[in-house]
């Protein structure tokens, strides 16, 4: 019997990667490109858990949700899980400039 998992993503590359990796285990990945509100939290784990819980309610099934962060050691791990916020307010050049002043 083939197993299924629901992957909450609109990222085709992420979907294809997981689909390929799990085929050997007889697991089908179903891509669920949902629009979810993303909380701002101190850890990427908190963000991913909240997204997964919200997604599971929407699709009424278990799911896998991923989130990423960017940590820059010279900036005390900034922006971390606040990458989306940082991208909205700062250019990559601004972030690089910040590292020059540390």
Image: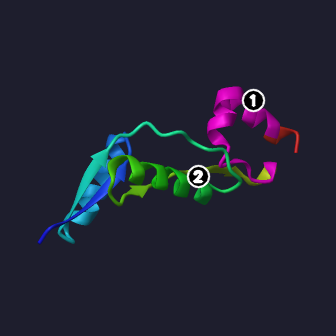
Q: Is residue 83 magenta?
A: yes
For the point 74% across and 36% down, the residue is: 96
SS at badge 1: helix
In this rendering, does residue 17 appear at all?
yes
Foreground: 3 or 56?
A: 56
Foreground: 68 or 4?
A: 4
Magenta stretch, main secondary structure, is helix
Query: How far apart are labels 2 and 1 at the CA level?
Result: 25 Å
Quarter residue 88 falls in: top right
Find disc 1 in the rendering and name its residue: 94
SS at badge 2: helix
Find disc 2 in the rendering and name its residue: 47
Which image quarter holds the N terminus?
Answer: bottom left
Q: Which residues are magenta?
A: 75-98
Colouring chosen for the image of the structure: rainbow
Q: Is residue 30 magenta?
A: no
Q: Position of residue 85 (x, y in %)?
A: 67, 35
Q: Position of residue 54 (x, y in %)?
A: 47, 49
Extreme-left residue of the structure = 1
For the point 64% across and 41% down, the residue is: 83
Quarter residue 97 falls in: top right
């Amino acid at each position: 019997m083939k197993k299924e998992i629901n992957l909450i993503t609109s990222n085709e590359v992420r979907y294809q990667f997981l689909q390929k990796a799990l085929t050997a285990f007889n697991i089908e990945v179903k891509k669920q490109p949902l629009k979810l509100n993303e909380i701002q939290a101190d850890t990427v784990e908190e963000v991913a858990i909240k997204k997964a819980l919200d997604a599971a309610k929407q699709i009424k099934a278990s799911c896998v949700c991923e989130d990423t962060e960017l940590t820059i050691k010279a900036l005390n791990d900034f922006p971390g899980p606040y990458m989306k916020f940082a991208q909205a307010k700062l250019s990559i050049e601004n972030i690089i400039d910040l590292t020059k002043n540390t």
